DNA sequence: CTGTTAGCGCCTTCAC
DNA sequence: GTGAAGGCGCTAACAG
């Protein structure tokens, strides 16, 4: 049909005015007669004209978009955060431009580069990025906030972190508070930074209470939880509490203990981490640490917007997950 | 520090060549001496030059981005589909530009308009958009695929649908296959198009088998499932099968029936819909229809890419969810 | 109030 | 192989 989209010039011709007037009329400037504005509107409608946002951006030197760099194969966590980012962005009138960070760091650099000149700000979530690489590839002139960075971060960037250490400490302290003294930590896989931080928090709390730490290797899967529970049942060292580094493992632990005749939480209390939807629905309901992922995303956008205005990052912002007490550490309900 | 990002002109000056040569050198054109290419590379590195993608796009008249329009407050379904879209897009070298579709249709039009000239193609997921509005606001010159549209769709757009009717039929037939004859459908909320389609599939299958349909009102919540189960227990009309329009309701139904002394699946079999993560983990594990949401997203991108090349939409594409048989309709395991 | 004129940063014919 | 010049579509001075 129509070979090419109508441009502002076509509208100008059709309305019998200059392109400047068209621009003014359509962008709601005040200095235009209502008459011309109407004529322009009509012409635009007639031609099915839609402004070319790319061109406008080039001219205005701002894009109305925020770039988001996230890992290639992201799971629930990033999906949820993304939802928050999305909500926050649209509240501020921004769109989100997504780009995948590959494990290959060359491609990652490309992914970030592909954002330059198309976004007004950047959100980088790159958990498994070689430590000092991030600083190297962030474009110097784009405001950026990095979420849970592992290594060096350019000083101009805003840092937002989930405080895994404090959260793990909180869970461990909760177990201590309800009277447990032999608390075992079922950690996540080696090489996962979160796993290490959570173990650290556990050890801190245990040490502070003058108790003895004991750590089992885990892998973030339900099967891993089952295996760990079997170990505990077999060796009978009198564990009375388990802090699993994520919910899925905890969900494996609980029924296995029960099948062996142990009462949860009376004999052994169990705590998880993440507050996945399952945690609430499982029986007995699981005590866990809730990371408000959507809120996290909203917060990230708010901080980015502030950074875009002031150009001065605030101190790193730590988000502390909330303890959610349910049946596996609480009073056993009917 | 550096006031402004370096442009191609800065690089040209620094390298002592023309902007054209810089462009050629950096874009890997063949007609450049290796010597100049090297000089240009050095200059670019020296200045920390990163090409301005927006400008390039304007000049090339293509953006390397795919626009995604999705509902304002999207849940798990869209998050998962988005993951698939993301994966597909990056496989084809595209980035994703997200835009929220508000309930307000004026703003929705704006959201779509804001894509024009920034994307090479469009994916529209707008479940609760006034039927004939979509056709009006889609830019005429941008290839688009619409997912699960409710009303009129421009002829140039590619349609991708989840076949709710056939899926509901399949589940109902499965219940019939295992010998059930009094199958009740617990439908989703009124006003939800999916609910209606699933009920339709149920009715089709029941009618085809010469059985009698019975439909209970539901609301997609666990509580709704519990309430429905209570109704069934109370009236004792001899139902031997329940097809719930989503997993959550089914998850409410099963334990309620069991508490009343009914065996699942022997006395009453139960089927859900969606295959949420819970379905597998619940006891007894739930039979359900699995919508491969990530795959759906991948498929959408593939079809969009094809459409961008050929400009000719294929026939509407129906995706059929897969029946996943688990314990609530299968052999009761130890 | 309106039109004319430069760019925004890049790519690409077209000559040399 | 390389440079000069025009243009992608739009906005923002600057004149009238």
Image (cartoon, coloured by chain):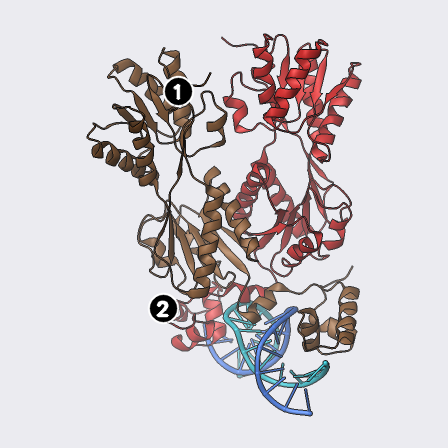
Chain colours: A brown, B red, C cyan, D blue
Q: Chain of mark 1?
A: A
Is there any visible trace of residue B324 in the rendered image? Answer: no
Q: Is residue A89 above or below residue B289?
A: below
Place of residue A219 in the rendered image (x, y in percent of width and height, measured from the top left): 36, 29
Residue A145 x, y percent position in the rendering: 41, 55
Q: Do the residues marked 2 and 1 share a common chain?
A: no
Q: Residue at x 61, y 31 (%)?
A: B291
Foreground residue, B14 or A12?
A: A12
Q: Is residue B263 above or below residue A145?
A: above
Instruction: Count the labels in the image.
Output: 2
Instruction: Report if residue A23 is visible in the image.
Output: yes
Q: Are marks 2 and 1 in contact (CB under 8 Å)?
A: no
Please name the residue shown 71% across and 57% down the image.
Answer: B139
Of marks 2 and 1, the one in the foreground: 1
Which residue in the structure is indicated by mark 2?
B42
A233 left or right of B192 in image: left
Left-right relation of A319 to A239: right
């Amino acid at each position: 049909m129509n070979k090419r989209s109508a441009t502002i010039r076509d509208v100008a011709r059709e309305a019998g005015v200059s392109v400047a007037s068209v621009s003014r009329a359509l962008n709601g400037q005040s200095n235009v007669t209502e008459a011309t504005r109407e004529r322009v509107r009509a012409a635009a409608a007639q031609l099915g004209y839609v402004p070319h946002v790319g061109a406008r951006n080039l001219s205005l030197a701002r894009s109305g978009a925020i770039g988001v760099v996230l890992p290639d194969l992201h799971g629930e966590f990033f999906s949820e955060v993304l939802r928050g980012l999305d909500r926050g962005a649209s509240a501020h009138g921004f769109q989100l431009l997504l780009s995948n960070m590959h494990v290959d760091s060359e491609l990652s650099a490309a992914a970030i580069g592909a954002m330059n000149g198309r976004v007004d700000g950047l959100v980088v979530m790159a958990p498994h990025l070689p430590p000092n690489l991030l600083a190297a590839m962030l474009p110097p002139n784009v405001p950026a906030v990095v979420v849970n960075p592992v290594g060096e971060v350019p000083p101009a960037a805003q840092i937002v972190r989930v405080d895994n250490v404090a959260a793990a400490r909180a869970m461990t302290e909760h177990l201590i508070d309800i009277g447990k003294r032999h608390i075992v930590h079922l950690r996540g896989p080696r090489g996962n930074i979160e796993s290490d931080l959570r173990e650290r928090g556990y050890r801190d709390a245990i040490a502070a209470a003058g108790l003895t730490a004991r750590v089992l290797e885990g892998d973030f899967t339900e099967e891993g939880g089952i295996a760990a529970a079997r170990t505990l049942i077999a060796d009978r060292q009198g564990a009375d509490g388990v802090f699993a580094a994520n919910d899925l493992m905890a969900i494996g632990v609980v029924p296995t203990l029960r099948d062996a005749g142990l009462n949860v939480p009376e004999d052994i209390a169990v705590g998880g981490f993440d507050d996945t939807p399952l945690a609430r629905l499982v029986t007995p309901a699981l005590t866990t640490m809730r990371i408000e992922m959507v809120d996290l995303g909203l917060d990230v956008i708010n901080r980015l917007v502030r950074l875009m205005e002031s150009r001065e990052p605030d101190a790193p912002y730590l988000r502390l997950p909330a303890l959610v007490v349910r049946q596996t550490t609480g009073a056993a309900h009917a």
